[in-house]
């Protein structure tokens, strides 16, 4: 049976309740990677590890390179399967931030019965509303340099200096969906990945969607919009600590699926042949980490067709 990933705005109260319940249970199940944390935190750990071996010219496992989209597609797929072991009716919903743009939008994710709201500035921007407020939802794993605080932190829509920042617009997404090809040499987002001021490489769909090229910074700006100037939980490589991570990345995955359908003659690049060889783990038939080290071969080619993975978007 095909899993349908629905728009957050169309979820019933029961669907929200079941999704939340499955996440809370997954947090308590024994982890596969370490006995020190639960099954949900395996995903936080994997995302943290994905950036550890980045260099000036190597993008690591999952960001700033061609594998950004297939790597996260498989990560979402895995989490969804774990949730469905708890409740087969559950799927990962997507948050359309081009439409549900305000924290107080009742059709958006920031309600007390779902993701909870922004953090309390009197409590270091700690999230105090919703089912993922501390101590019900306790953080265990942290990024290097991240405050080791056991609670979610958010400062929705606030940028540096207290200035408001905006979510991507429908026009920016439309422009992104027109971009081709999928990726371009030298197969990374910027000339020097370790320098924030390094220029971006030539435009491509993947680079524009991730947020490295063009107005909008599609994927990246949403992380910053949620974390805010306070650098809350979504601003770090431990971003899956905040369950909104999955709703955001479901939207990114959905946009990739729309692009694939709109450009049937455009192929995933680099293929790894004919001189088009990219970084290890980013070529079409390369085994992606960390699954390779876990004894499971998962390549970008294996996840290009979401319907073969058994899901589609509403």
Image: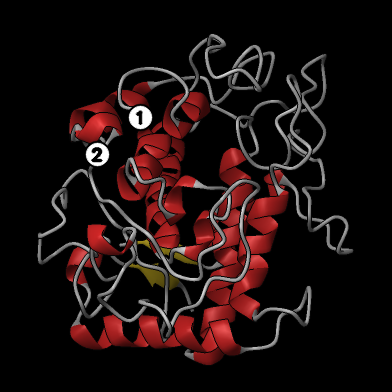
Of the pair 227 and 72, the residue shown nearer to us: 227
Judged from the image, the secondary structure of the residue bearing numbered disc 2 is loop
Q: At x 68% / y 62%, what residue is drawn?
A: 45
Q: Quadrant of residue 191?
A: top right
Total count of labels = 2
Query: Is residue 273 in view from this perspective?
Result: yes
Can you say which quadrant of the picture contains the C terminus? bottom left
- Residue 253 screen position, x and y as percent: 45, 49
- Colour convention of the picture: secondary structure
Kindly give the residue lying farthest to the front in the view shown. Answer: 122
Q: At x 52% / y 47%, what residue is drawn?
A: 236
> Which numbered tag is attached to residue 167?
2
- Residue 158 screen position, x and y as percent: 24, 41
Of the pair 172 and 270, the residue shown nearer to us: 172
- Residue 132 screen position, x and y as percent: 37, 77
Viewed as shown, does residue 280 lie left or right of 229? right
* Vertical side of 124 occupied by 33: above or below: below
Judged from the image, the secondary structure of the residue bearing numbered disc 1 is helix
C-alpha gap between disc 2 and disc 1: 17 Å
Q: At x 30% / y 86%, what residue is drawn?
A: 17
Q: Disc 1 marks which residue?
A: 177
């Amino acid at each position: 049976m095909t899993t349908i990933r629905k728009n957050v705005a169309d979820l019933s109260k029961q669907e929200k309740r079941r999704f939340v319940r499955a996440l809370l249970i997954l947090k308590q199940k024994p982890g596969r990677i370490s006995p020190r944390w639960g099954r949900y935190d395996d995903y936080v750990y994997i995302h943290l590890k994905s950036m550890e071996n980045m260099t000036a010219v190597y993008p690591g496992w999952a960001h700033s390179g061609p594998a950004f989209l297939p790597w996260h597609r498989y990560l979402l797929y895995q989490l969804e399967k774990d949730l469905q072991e708890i409740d087969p009716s559950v799927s990962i919903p997507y948050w359309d931030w081009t439409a549900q743009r305000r924290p107080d939008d009742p059709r958006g994710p920031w309600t007390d019965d779902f993701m909870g709201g922004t953090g309390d500035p009197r409590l270091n921007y700690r999230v105090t509303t919703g089912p993922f407020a501390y101590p019900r939802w306790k953080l265990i794993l942290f990024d290097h340099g991240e405050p080791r605080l056991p609670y979610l932190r958010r400062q929705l829509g606030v940028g540096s200096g207290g200035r408001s920042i905006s979510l991507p617009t429908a026009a920016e997404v439309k422009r992104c969906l027109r971009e081709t090809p999928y990726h371009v040499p030298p197969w990374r987002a910027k000339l020097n990945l370790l320098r924030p001021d390094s220029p971006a490489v030539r435009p491509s769909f993947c680079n524009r969607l991730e947020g490295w090229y063009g107005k909008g910074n599609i994927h990246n700006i949403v992380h910053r919009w949620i974390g805010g100037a306070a650098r809350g939980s979504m601003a770090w490589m431990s971003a899956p600590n905040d369950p909104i991570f999955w709703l955001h990345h479901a939207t990114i995955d959905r946009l990739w699926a729309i692009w694939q359908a709109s450009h049937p003659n455009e192929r995933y690049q680099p293929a790894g042949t004919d001189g088009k060889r990219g970084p290890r783990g980013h070529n079409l038939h390369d085994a992606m980490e960390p699954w390779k080290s876990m004894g499971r071969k998962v390549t970008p080619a294996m996840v290009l067709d979401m319907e073969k993975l058994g899901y589609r978007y509403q």
